[in-house]
């Protein structure tokens, strides 16, 4: 029997698991995919927003501003990368200047620190590659960029090191309630008993909610966002997150420097009916290109190495829906977490625990604060490298040369407390295959290392999900 | 460790550069990241190599073995399983290497030749819309899995891009029992050699869809279906021309890009078309003492041309070392003009030992009959009639060095003869 079952291992579930694991409770995180942190958390802009575009007084506005500040502590606590880029919302003409002033007022109302409107000349100095015709910008110094996968992964690793159980390939297929206990059915075959459920199932949270609620408090309206990724050779071309003025559909198409040096262009914003539709579209590609050239004439489109799409869990409730179920008060909805969900995530976790959970929690006497991260060999200083390579000679073998990943980095990722044995899982953990050649050179090497380390035949190694093996034996009869 | 010449990459270009640079008095080293010499030739088990260099038709491994044998005979030193992590230019080059056997270590070199080959363009570079399942990969990766490891990546295949690798793989996958449903190319012509279209597609009744591209990819986990459309003159899909294919694999043969990773400390002038170094007639880059040749410089049609170019590059690096030519030489630009996509070299240096200049170029379009003109000071200094010039085939001409004057750029232009 569990005290808490957390459904979903994205950024929300992970950070809730991390916070809860500090208390004397028994936790289990359920993830339907074969790897943790596999949905919206790995397909978004990676921005820690300031919160300028949010309606004052909403939970979104409060938790965004609070969450933004909490990332500075998370940076140390979880050793996560945090780029203090600052953000610039740019006005294209005099007409837009009025709108800029309006969001300035809104930013002040939301309690964002350090905001100011800067003129054309200052903007030009800050970002020489922006269009010279832009008239002014709202300067948002608290805007930052992180690596969302790593935040969630570090949080889960912390939770696991402090007793939380993490179960992948565990799709919740039913929930029943009797005698003060929930029975959570997994994959139509297994039952887990728990006192509480926290649902952070992203775009599928309404699906989970429907298992227990009579009247649905919200509906998920999935919205797709497509992106382009520019190679990290472009590092430094833009220093800030560049926003156009927000429109009805959201923040618009942005220019976002990433922690690994790449630059993202996007997202689009399209309402879709199929929650699992992660396809990119010709229209999407066109839209990003058309929009982003209003911001800069210097976008190096020839440096595009990849495109992807993510689905945001927008809801009919509009604000974040973080409430106990009226029908079953020990079931907690953490739903409708679209933008600024990543930013608000740490604040959502503490808000849930401090204000929503109907239980007095007692802190653990001993906490394990040392967690195993994913620091790559090349990220160490020269002195540490010498020592590491002596103990682990396989650091001498560069497997992915685009991202400088060693064989030992890959072995460590496979055997990590939350390891993986898929090509995509390893790519997420150590970036092998994320670079210029997109795995053209290293995929076969990674595949063989996984097979060797996990004692599997190479034909059993999957690209990502179950049944996505890359290699087939040649039929002998042919 | 100090070396006179270090060659980075032990494929065809690296081996040939070493042979070209060979001199018993010079201290050389070839650095290869793989487990054996020969590079990509090892996976090119089809024949068709060697007619220019060895005057006989060889398979890739046979061609590689000949080069390796020659290097062995000359006892040219090499290291395997070793990756170059960084290069820094000081008085000489400081190269940081890594291997399991020796860990991290530095070597110093007077001259460096980059023969790192090229990498394959991926889906991300060409905006193919749709899902992102497993089953989409560069044709060269599939070739490696099949010819080096002995595994098929799929049973029902479609190939986008009719470059030579795509064509060769269409035949190879068919021979191993897979069904190749077709090959599409966005261009109205194939970028592969004519003999490959005949021997790899026609002979196996594999359809070639010219002026077509992939417009949709379907399949959440594994590839299930692709759609192709015909494209108009601006390469935009024409609505209503959709054809779908139930396939589990889409191989991409959509181009190769020189693999000259810009090391942190080493940034040479690059050419926007070749995406590699700007070089002079000795294949020396804007960084003195750093040479680039083979597919790392520009993508060749045939390994024979790679070998000829790289031998020349090696010999020039040696000459430079012997002549100890350290002064900055006067240079002029070589500029591609009408119907010329790029010319190698992009610069001509005025030294004391050059006799002829080899100019290599590709056209921007198919030219049935034309005249190549080399112009300096608005005067044609060299012209040559050429037939059947296509972008897929690299052309070259030799120009006597004394014809060129020091004081103006030379222009390379192709005049189309209207029939």
Image: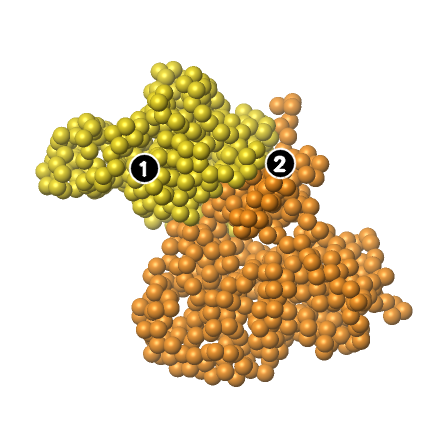
Q: Which chain is yellow?
A: B
Label annotation for residue A448: 2
Q: Nearer the viewer, residue B260 or A137?
A: B260
Give the crowd class for mark 1: few <14, some 14-19, many >=20 residues within 10 Å.
many
Identify which residue is drawn at 71% across, 67% down.
Answer: A19
Q: Chain of mark 1?
A: B
> Is residue A281 placed above or below B284 in the rendered structure?
below
Find residue A309 and report its horizontal and vertical position in percent.
54, 57
Q: Would residue A54 appear left or right of A369 to someone viewing this image? A: left
* Quarter containing the C terminus of chain B: top left
Look at discs 2 and 1 and give the one toward the viewer: 1
> Residue beneath label 1, please?
B289
Q: Which chain is orange?
A: A
- Give the secondary structure at mark 1: loop
Q: Nearer the viewer, residue B305 or B74?
A: B74
> Is residue B49 placed above or below B289 in the rendered structure?
above
- Give the secondary structure at mark 2: helix
Within the image, what quadrant is residue A295 found in?
bottom left
Find residue A4 and report its horizontal and vertical position in percent.
79, 65
Find residue A6 and report its horizontal and vertical position in percent.
74, 63
Same chain letter for marks 2 and 1 = no
Q: Residue farthest to the right? A: A179
Label annotation for residue A276: none
* Quarter containing the N terminus of chain B: top left
Q: Chain of mark 2?
A: A
Q: Would residue B28 appear left or right of A76 to someone viewing this image? A: left
Q: Is residue A330 visible?
A: no
> Is residue B133 placed above or below A88 in the rendered structure?
above
Find residue A243 and report its horizontal and vertical position in percent.
44, 69
């Amino acid at each position: 029997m569990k005290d808490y079952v957390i459904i979903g291992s994205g950024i929300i579930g992970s950070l809730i698991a991390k916070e809860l694991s500090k208390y004397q409770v028994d936790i289990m995180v359920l993830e339907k995919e074969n790897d943790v942190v596999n949905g919206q958390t790995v397909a978004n802009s990676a921005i820690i927003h300031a919160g300028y575009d949010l309606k004052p007084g909403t939970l979104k506005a409060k938790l965004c501003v609070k969450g933004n500040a909490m990332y500075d502590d998370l940076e140390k606590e979880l050793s996560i990368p945090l780029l203090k880029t600052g953000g610039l919302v740019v006005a294209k003409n005099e007409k837009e200047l009025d709108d800029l002033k309006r969001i300035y007022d809104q930013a002040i109302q939301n309690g964002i620190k350090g905001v100011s409107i800067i003129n054309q000349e200052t903007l030009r100095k800050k970002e020489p590659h922006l269009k010279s015709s832009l008239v002014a910008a709202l300067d948002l110094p608290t805007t930052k960029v992180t690596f969302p996968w790593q935040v969630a992964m570090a949080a889960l690793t912390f939770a696991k090191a402090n007793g939380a159980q993490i179960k992948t390939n565990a799709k919740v297929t039913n929930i029943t309630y009797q005698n003060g206990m929930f029975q959570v059915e997994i994959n139509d075959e297994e039952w887990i008993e728990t006192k509480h459920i926290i649902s952070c199932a992203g775009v599928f949270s309404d699906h989970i909610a429907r298992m227990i609620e009579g009247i649905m408090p919200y509906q998920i309206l999935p919205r797709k966002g497509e992106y382009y990724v520019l190679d990290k050779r472009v590092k430094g071309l833009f220093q800030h997150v560049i926003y156009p003025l927000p429109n009805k559909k959201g923040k618009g198409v942005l220019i976002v420097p990433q922690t690994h040096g790449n630059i993202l262009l996007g997202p689009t914003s399209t309402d879709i009916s199929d929650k699992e539709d992660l396809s990119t579209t010709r229209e999407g590609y066109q839209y990003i290109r058309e929009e982003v050239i209003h911001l800069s004439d210097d976008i190096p489109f020839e440096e595009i190495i990849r495109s992807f799409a993510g689905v945001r869990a927008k809801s009919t409730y509009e604000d974040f829906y973080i409430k106990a179920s009226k029908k079953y008060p020990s079931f907690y909805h953490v739903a409708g977490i679209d933008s600024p969900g990543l930013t608000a995530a740490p604040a959502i976790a503490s808000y849930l625990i401090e204000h929503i959970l109907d239980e007095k929690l007692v802190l653990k006497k001993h906490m394990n604060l040392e967690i195993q991260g994913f620091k790559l060999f090349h990220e160490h200083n020269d002195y540490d490298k010498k020592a590491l390579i002596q103990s682990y000679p396989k650091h001498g073998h560069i497997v992915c040369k685009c991202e400088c990943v060693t064989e030992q980095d890959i072995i460590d990722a496979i055997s990590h407390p939350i390891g993986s044995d898929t090509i995509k899982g390893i790519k997420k953990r150590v970036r092998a295959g994320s670079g210029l050649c997109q795995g053209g050179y290293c995929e076969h090497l990674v595949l063989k290392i996984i097979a060797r380390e996990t004692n599997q035949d190479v034909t059993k190694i999957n690209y990502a999900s179950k049944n996505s093996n890359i290699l087939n034996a040649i039929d002998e009869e042919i | 460790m100090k070396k006179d010449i270090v060659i980075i990459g032990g494929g065809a270009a690296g081996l040939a550069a070493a042979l070209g640079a060979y001199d018993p008095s010079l201290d050389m080293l070839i650095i290869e990241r793989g487990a054996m010499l020969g590079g990509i030739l090892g996976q090119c088990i089809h024949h068709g190599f060697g007619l220019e260099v060895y005057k006989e038709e060889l398979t890739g491994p046979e061609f590689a073995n000949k080069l390796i044998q020659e290097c062995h005979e000359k006892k040219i030193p090499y290291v395997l399983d070793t990756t170059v992590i960084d290069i820094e230019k000081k008085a000489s080059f400081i190269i940081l290497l890594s291997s399991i056997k020796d860990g991290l270590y530095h070597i110093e070199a007077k001259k460096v030749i980059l023969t790192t080959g090229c990498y394959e363009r991926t889906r991300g570079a060409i905006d193919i819309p749709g899902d992102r399942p497993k089953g989409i990969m560069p044709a060269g990766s599939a070739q490696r899995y099949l010819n080096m490891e002995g595994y098929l990546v799929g049973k029902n295949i479609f190939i986008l891009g009719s470059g030579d690798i795509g064509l060769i793989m269409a035949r190879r996958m068919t021979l191993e029992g897979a069904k190749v449903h077709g090959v599409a190319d966005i261009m109205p012509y194939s970028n592969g050699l004519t003999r490959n279209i005949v021997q790899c597609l026609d002979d196996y009744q594999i359809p070639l869809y010219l002026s077509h591209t992939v417009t949709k990819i379907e399949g959440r986990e594994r590839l299930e279906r692709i759609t192709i459309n015909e494209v108009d003159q601006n390469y935009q899909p024409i609505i209503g021309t959709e054809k779908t294919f139930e396939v589990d694999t889409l191989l991409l043969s959509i181009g190769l890009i020189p693999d000259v990773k810009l090391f942190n400390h080493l940034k040479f002038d690059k050419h926007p078309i070749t995406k590699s170094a700007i070089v002079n007639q000795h294949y020396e880059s804007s960084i003195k003492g750093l040479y680039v040749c083979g597919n790392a410089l520009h993508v060749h049609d045939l390994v024979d041309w790679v070998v000829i170019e790289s031998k020349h590059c090696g010999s020039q690096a040696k000459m430079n070392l012997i002549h100890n030519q350290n002064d900055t030489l006067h240079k002029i630009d070589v500029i591609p003009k009408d119907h010329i996509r790029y010319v190698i070299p992009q610069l001509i240096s005025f030294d004391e030992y050059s006799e002829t200049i080899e100019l290599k170029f590709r056209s921007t379009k198919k030219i049935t009959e034309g005249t190549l003109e080399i112009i300096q000071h608005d005067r044609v200094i060299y012209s040559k009639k050429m037939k059947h010039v296509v972008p897929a085939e690299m052309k070259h001409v030799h120009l006597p060095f004394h014809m060129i004057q020091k004081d103006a750029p030379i222009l390379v232009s192709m005049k189309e003869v209207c029939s």
